[in-house]
Image: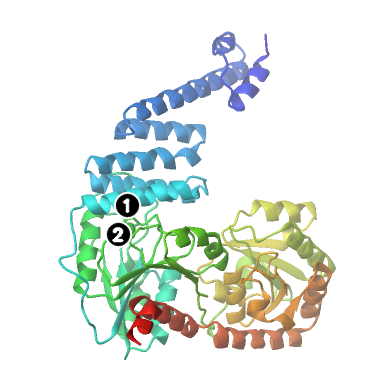
Amino acid sequence: MPSLLELVERVNKGELIDSALLEVYQESSNAAEKFLANHARAMLDLRRSHTYLLEALEAIDYADQKVLFQFLAVLGFLGLSEQRAAPVIKFGAAAISRREVALGLEAIQSGVLQDAQQDSYFTRDRGNSGLVAQQYDRAAQAIGWFPPGNCDWNNPQLKIAFLTSSLGDDDAASRMLLGISKHIDQKDVKIHAYSTEANVRREKQAFTQGPFTGPSSKRGKETIETLNRRKVSTWIAPLDQDLASAAKELGQQIFRDQIDVLIIDAGLADPIAAVVANWQIAKAKINLVRRSPLLAGAVNAAIYLDSTLQKADESHWRMKSTDAQFVQEGIEPTNTEAASAQRSAYGIPEQSIILATTADNDGNVSEAFLDAAVQILRQHPQTVLLVAGEADQAVVKRRLDSAGLSKRVGFAGKRKDLADFLRMADVYLAPFPRNAVAGTLAAMSAGRSIVAMSGAPDDSQRAENFIGAELTVQNLPSYVDRAAALIRDPNLRNQTGETLKARAGGQFGYEHTARAIEAICRGLLHPPQEHRQAA
């Protein structure tokens, strides 16, 4: 007969053992044995409940919300939250089939959000993302609203609208909107802004979801005021309606405003935007893709802000005969008079040289890059490393811990004020082999010197495309040497930083982004073949 410790170990590994083997220990006079045996028995019973509840849900096509919540609770106890998305999304699909559209949309949104939070696998699969997109299409039809006419208006100005999930003073979508509206020619183009408020708690909520964000009226107060000064029409979805009603209200507003091109800066976690994408409420619709596309059937084009993602999705758009282009997101040079992040907040002595880098979820921080960082820190005892970004810190921590450098590294997490934050740094270490474009451009706009290695020839986001080939090294020893030169020479740091700041404003400002997006919009309304036919 196996020992109690052997039984507990098997249970902890997820095995389903015969619960009778634990009974003798469950009534033991030894407190430790009694604790371990009863806890193992509880885990066994939970795993069996997990199986039975899943089979029950499958038997009724995931149609019972009470049983679904029981199943989700068991997943939480078992530490299997990454499995939450699939049953929740299937429940949402079943609700839409029953014409409970608002409930279905809330459930699907909850599943997608939780999947993203857990960095799980479900919605990263293109087939599953397509399933979610199909449910949004079904919901758009089930709502029963259709535009009251054709989009046959003839506006004196080109009307371009940006549809976002929210307006926040530090949100990427709001920065894009502010950058475009600043540099667009208002004589020729009229900008509209719509916020779905999809992640804000609503008065009518049928399915528990989260996390919730604050309304745009609070989170984006400065953004809204700036848009008003620039005469950008702004519409924010009401919160006294459910998701289905809010989508209908938004569709009506866009149609009333006679929008020529609707740019949807939102993903699958925004059900209102996804539903609206299926209605013919503008002459053309563009999905602006930051991470994954909406996959909506009625989208006319896609704009990617990441060339690697655009290349990965080329075959999908080619099959749909839909144009998908990469556009470099702009960056505005930071105010040199603005106060930078305080060193004291991170416990950094004033005499230290701060190195900074950006670690993203796309695996840009490689072992080779960490080796270079370790070499630089060891060779220069006065240096410290700050790591910003949303990637898992464990890999970086383990490498620096093993090198005995854990006390000289700090983690700043995801920064919405990345450019201002990087003003605290002396040198920015661009990760490789994949460049963190947002970090590199933020460092340039902040006037920081940069150490960067050349990327693969077919990678359009390689570092030399941004900072210039003359400031890019070719191998790891040169990377370490270049960092050493910048650490030793403050004049070289300042000179390089000013050069890069001027380059950021001259070549990567929002003026270029605005021109590129306007050209794509006009191209959709007046395709080249029309000109050839007219000729």
- Can residue 203 be seen by looking at this rendering? no
Residue under label 2, please give it: 278
Task: Categorize mark 2 by other alpha carbons within 10 Å: few (<14), some (14-19), many (20+).
Answer: many
Marks 1 and 2, the one that precedes in the sequence? 1
Front in this rendered view, residue 199 or 108: 108
Q: Looking at the picture, how far across and down is residue 64, in whole percent?
A: 29, 32
Q: Residue at x 22, y 82 (%)?
A: 154
Q: Looking at the picture, how far across and down is residue 171, in whole percent?
A: 44, 68
Q: Looking at the picture, how far across and down is residue 290, in whole percent?
A: 48, 64
Residue under label 1, please give it: 136
- State the image quarter where residue 221 is shown: bottom left
Q: Residue at x 55, y 71 (%)?
A: 418
- The scheme the figure's colours follow is rainbow
Task: Categorize mark 1 by other alpha carbons within 10 Å: few (<14), some (14-19), many (20+).
Answer: many
Front in this rendered view, residue 12 or 452: 452
Helix, strand or loop under label 1: helix
Q: In the rendered structure, which amino acid carries the disc numbered 1?
A: Tyr
- State the image quarter where residue 11 is shown: top right
Quick one: quadrant of the C terminus? bottom left
Quick one: quadrant of the N terminus? top right
Q: In the rendered structure, which amino acid carries the disc numbered 2?
A: Asn
When the figure is inspected, residue 109 is found, relative to residue 345, above or below; the finding is: above
Front in this rendered view, residue 434 or 9: 434
Q: Is residue 445 left or right of residue 499?
A: left
- State the image quarter where residue 186 is shown: bottom left
Separation of residues labelled 1 and 2 (CA atoms): 8 Å
Say if mark 1 contacts mark 2, CB within 8 Å: yes
When the figure is inspected, residue 383 is found, relative to residue 55, above or below; the finding is: below
Q: Looking at the picture, how far across and down is residue 161, in whole percent?
A: 32, 74
- Can residue 323 be seen by looking at this rendering? yes
Helix, strand or loop under label 2: loop
- Residue furthest toward the left? 148
